[in-house]
Image: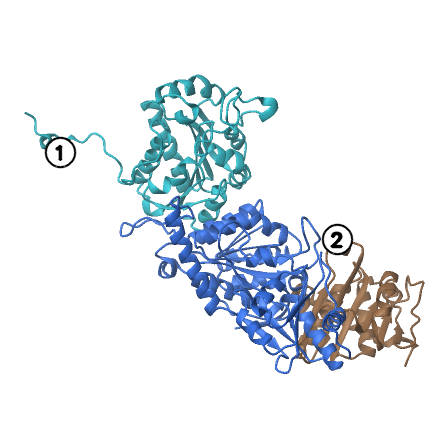
Chain colours: A brown, B blue, C cyan
Amino acid sequence: MTEEIIIAGFGGQGVLSMGKILAYSGIMQDQEVSWMPSYGPEMRGGTANVTVIISDERISSPVLTRFDTAIILNQQSMDKFEAQVKPGGTLLYDPNGITHHPTRKDINIYRVEAARLAAESGNPKIFNMIILGAFLKVKPVVKLENIEKGLKKSLPPRHHNMIPMNIEAVQMGMGHIETVNQL
Amino acid sequence: MSEIKLMKGNEVIAEAAIRCGCDGYFGYPITPQSEVMETLMLRKPWEETGMVVLQAESEIASINMVYGGAACGKKVMTSSSSPGVSLMQEGLTYIAGAELPCLVVDVVRGGPGLGTIQPAQSDYFQATKGGGHGDYHLIVLAPASVQEMNDFVSLGFDLAFKYRNPAMILADGVIGQMMEKVELSPYKPRWTEEEIEKISGDWALTGKKKARGHHIVTSLELDAHRQEVFNEKLQRKYREIEEKEVRFEKIHCDDAEYLFIAYGSSARICQKSIELARQEGIKVGLLRPITLYPFPTRAIAEMAERTKGMLTVEMSAGQMVEDVRLAVNGKTRVEHYGRMGGVVPTPEEIVDALKANFNLKP
Amino acid sequence: MIDINDIVKPENLVYGKTSLLTDNIMHYCPGCTHGVVHKLVAEVIEELDIQDKTIGVSPVGCSVFAYNYIDIDWAEAAHGRAPAVATAISRLHPEKYVFTYQGDGDLASIGCGEIMHACNRGENIVIIFINNAIYGMTGGQMAPTTLLGQVTATTPYGRDAKLNGFPLKITELLAQLDGTCYVTRQSADTPGAVRKAKSAIKKAFQNTRLNKGTSFVEVVGTCNSGWKLSPVEANKWMRENMFEKYPLGDMKDI
């Protein structure tokens, strides 16, 4: 199994940390992982993206232009990455702020209203964990228990009290996924 | 005890330095490697191992601090990226000329000039051919994973002290910025004064004792003939390094009709290209130089006898390709594919370049 | 007839060369101040009994070969970088006495950045700064401390402020920095001045023992070869011209 994922959105949406939790969770189940961010001034308020690869085998290129899954959280990223999903692959997005919705017919397309759900829950910070939950619903590449372990590894101990809240957010995301196009 | 962690290449450099008993780090911030010093400052190794960490006023000062520390027989290092490493060239030639061991990490970015902050491999010439004035070489290690960022810190110091020669880890923005699983090395204590006396006691500045003459660390010799004798000694050392320290990795080479030659992150991308090309029935392999100096000349020459062509893939206008052509010496065709200025090649375009250069049809 | 062996006896000894000066013949021109200051540094190290704890850093310039004359461990630094080299040695050997020995080109021109920042960090080191207002080793070119109107190989019509800027009072600048604990300007042109310069150098080394920060001792010196004067004339010229721009005395002593 090899899953090549791009997560793309605005800086501040938790794109990089979601990727990190995913990667750590992969390590927790003895898989190979890589996490390659875009870096530089563009991160400050602009777009941010990270390529995460989880695999049973040694990972070749950490830099990719074709993805099994694209998780897209703003319009610029939609414009850039919709075309980069492999045929038969998966695109997951939050419709919040999206004006040009994905149109491809040769990939699976799902949406989750994570921004709305997070706002309604009164805690906008769980946005990225709702997204992560939705992703795991369609692509269960890591087990929920390993997400919990991954959170423990990637969060400093003083934030460990927030782990249950994050797990609830993951479960919330799992329960709110909508199918737009299914092959 | 070793530990499995998910870490950035740059962070691992810092962690590996502390764990391998490094005595001092002297640096100046520059993207894309500032996490090295940031991680060290956060870790406060001076409280844990006594390692000194200092933010210098410039790369010029950093490398001269390294000169000072190395002159004392201490394990000292710096890290920087291309424009900063250009500023360090003066210090590096003095360090090579004074035969001092040290470790320099270069997380290369696109040039020339201020250039970009994106990954590049356009400093191969600077790293492997000396870089500063005079006839000298650095020992150059090219990591292709976060794990190798960890492993090469300790290997770099080992080689530097074995040959009393500066060693460099030549990485790039991809290797520095990405996170991968890494098994951190177990802690090694810093050398005691007695150990330094044993390892480097015949030259290091430890304070002149009555029992010995004074030690002078210098690269100055005004007499041309004596300077030539010294240069001959240096050259003998380089020949020994070329004989004993070549490291490389072969991937899918056994049945390969064509060969990629690539190092660092380009070598990683080429591995994906191999998967793609082999799906199309193209038998291609990869020879990855791990040491760029000494260069795996012999291994490449051997492969030249049994391949139809070689494609070097570098994030540069083509620098390592010159060493490959020297190694091949006309025995097979050698072509170059590169992206410049901070653009990272995609696995697909590398396959296209292979097909185009060698007229291959799927 | 007096036998010399009746005179050369320990009880008759009134002055001796310190054992820390090697027997190598100095390459300095007759009349140069470097030789005197080398002797003072060597005497201070001997008197403080810190030969095995002292590491010197020599510059690029006439005193590049300082390591041939004082019998301690030395590093020879790239041009201007001695304070950076000394910084690392001192940080890695906090118990040692580390000093740089630099001329005006090395310290005040090409190494301006390194000296500023080493002093500003308050590195626990000693800086010996020889200011003779000219580049000696390369053949008498303008230094940052060259006086206005002074003729050198690169100011053949005299230093002109419009063309070359003004003499740099680097020592006054360094005295402003919080990291320096002792900043003084001395000379070595009379026996009295030599004695005062020696106590300044000794105090600087003692400051290292007390971990007080950076001690900076400037010695205004002569370069009779570069100035194209006899040693005696050079001393006279120094007193008449240099001391006005570079007045002697302590600028800071905390």
Q: What's the chain of the residue with tag 2?
A: A
Disc number at residue C9? 1
Residue depicted at 9% across the width and 31% down the height: C6
Nearest the eye: B155 or A146: B155
* B49 versus C62 height, above or below: below
Q: What's the chain of the residue with tag 1?
A: C
What whole-number distance in Å separates the C-alpha atoms at marks 2 and 1? Answer: 78 Å
- Element under label 2? helix
Whether residue A91 sits left or right of residue B120 in the image: it is right
Type of the residue with mark 1: Lys
Disc number at residue B332? none
Whether residue B342 sits left or right of residue B233 in the image: it is right
Type of the residue with mark 2: Pro
Q: Position of residue B177 (x, y in %)?
A: 67, 62
Disc number at residue A41? 2
Q: Position of residue B337 (x, y in %)?
A: 70, 65
> Do callouts 2 and 1 point to residues on the same chain?
no
Q: Position of residue B230 (x, y in %)?
A: 39, 53
Q: Work out which residue is located at the far front of the displayed protein and give it.
A: B330
Q: Is residue A103 visible?
A: yes
Whether residue A156 sits left or right of residue B214 in the image: it is right
Nearest the eye: B146 or B190: B146
Q: Quadrant of residue B350?
A: bottom right
